[in-house]
Amino acid sequence: MDKRLAEIREKVANGIRLTKEDGLFLYEFPDLLSIGQIAKEKKKQLIGDYVFFNVNCHINLTNICVSKCKFCAFGVDENAPKPYAMTVEQAFDYASRAVDQGITEFHIVSALNPKLTLDYYVEIISRLKKAYPHILIQALTAVEIVYLANISHLSVEEVLCALKDAGLDAIPGGGAEILDDRIRKELCPRKASSEEWLEVHRIAHKLGIKTNCTMLFGHIENYEDRINHLLKLRELQDEAPGFKAFIPLPFLPENTALAHLNKTSVFDQLKTIAISRLILDNIEHIKAFWVMLGIPVAQIALEFGADDLDGTIIEEKIMHAAGAKTDKGISKTSIIRLIKEAGYIPAERDTVYNILQTY
Ligand code: V47
């Protein structure tokens, strides 16, 4: 094995934190399988033989969005051909239809719609919680929370407390993109800054709300931007722990303002999963989000340090607007089979990683 890589392996085995330079070395180093092996060892050290999944339902309350992020094909203008915004009643009915499928989570990510106020979200969350107290609600990305705070003239903490009182259990990891304001200015200038995104998660963690974090990669950023992003997440987790899982999201260019860019390679996707596992030594779970990676790559990612395939979803919309080729949902039986086939123990979890059942 290459001497520098052997040093990194030694550090990982002894629980010594990797540096920015280690991360950059790994990105430049071509031996993907050896990097994957080290990440797999780290995953085994942390999680053993389990691979997690959950039975959930994605709900996107509206696609009307003032943010107009260049990477997004989901958000549209109010005057575009197919804008929608569910009423509270419609949202409740949509969510209720999924309950019979044994879901344990409502995953709610929407858009920056100026007509939807904090009261609207509070009402949906409290109605769902009242009707289905056993189902956890993971809702509103940090970017949506900053937007709601701004249009309601409230602080982020006030918004989070109102949502928590209504029944919010956790916050999804979206909106992080790349936590660098130079890149955000180019990609998504109208939404929360890097520090604002981090601050929402910092406050949520202090209020006892668990959250996830993501990284959108494979657009205009470089390796150093990616490593800096991972280091910012690691630093926040040291300071105010509360991240449960990290989800690397490979950029899908179709129907976006960046449609001229190539899709990231499978090589880059697997390497990013492995490097995330190695750098984020204080975040327990790394998700291979099957919708984005496609099922074959998501299954292989389990050999590169990922320990979670995400959920059954039912009807995914954001990634499919941008050309995701997978089905919009997957059955629980299929997820269990994929995990078993890869040699792991399927562990059905709830939103915050309590194990509900193993198979
Ligand atoms: O922030 C949007 C991404 C995110 C594209 O917490 C795109 O478990 C790739 O929050 N290509 C929202 N990515 C989704 C989100 C999420 C997804 C899965 C799991 C979790 C979790 C949260 O979707 C956005 C953005 O980074 N996104 N458009 C695109 N064209």
Image (tube, rainbow, N blue to C red):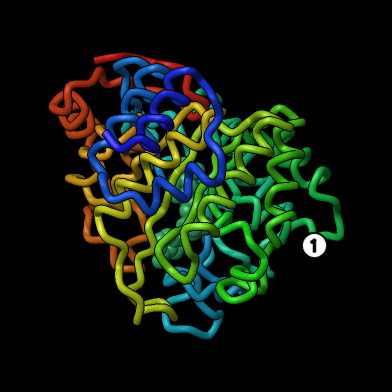
x and y percent of residue 270 in the render? Answer: 30, 46
x and y percent of residue 185 in the render? Answer: 64, 74
Give the class, few, some or many, for how many residues have Cα within 10 Å of label 1's Cα (few <14, many ≥20): few
Q: Which residue is pictured at 26% across the width and 60% down the height? A: 265
On the image, which quarter does residue 171 sit in?
Answer: top right
x and y percent of residue 146 in the render? Answer: 73, 56
Camera-side residue of 222 and 82: 222
> How many numbered marks are there?
1
Q: Which residue is pictured at 35% across the width and 65% down the height? A: 252
Residue 107 vs 186, above or below: the answer is above
Q: Report the side of 162 relative to 238 (left or right).
A: right
On the image, which quarter does residue 266 sit in?
Answer: bottom left
Outermost residue toward the front in this view: 3
Q: Which residue is pictured at 25% across the width and 45% down the height? A: 31
x and y percent of residue 187 in the render? Answer: 56, 73
Q: Which residue is pictured at 57% across the width and 56% down the height? A: 175
In this view of the protein, can residue 318 be seen by the observer? no
Mark 1 Cβ inside 8 Å of ligand 1? no
Q: Which quarter of the image is occupied by the C terminus?
A: top left
Outermost residue toward the left in this view: 341
In this view of the protein, can residue 265 be seen by the observer? yes
> In the image, what residue type sits under mark 1?
Asn
**Residue that numbered label 1 is attached to:** 150
User: Does dot 1 land on a helix, a strand or a loop?
Assistant: helix
Residue 262 vs 290, above or below: the answer is below
Q: Report the side of 36 relative to 143 (left or right).
A: left
Q: Which quarter of the image is occupied by the N terminus?
A: top left
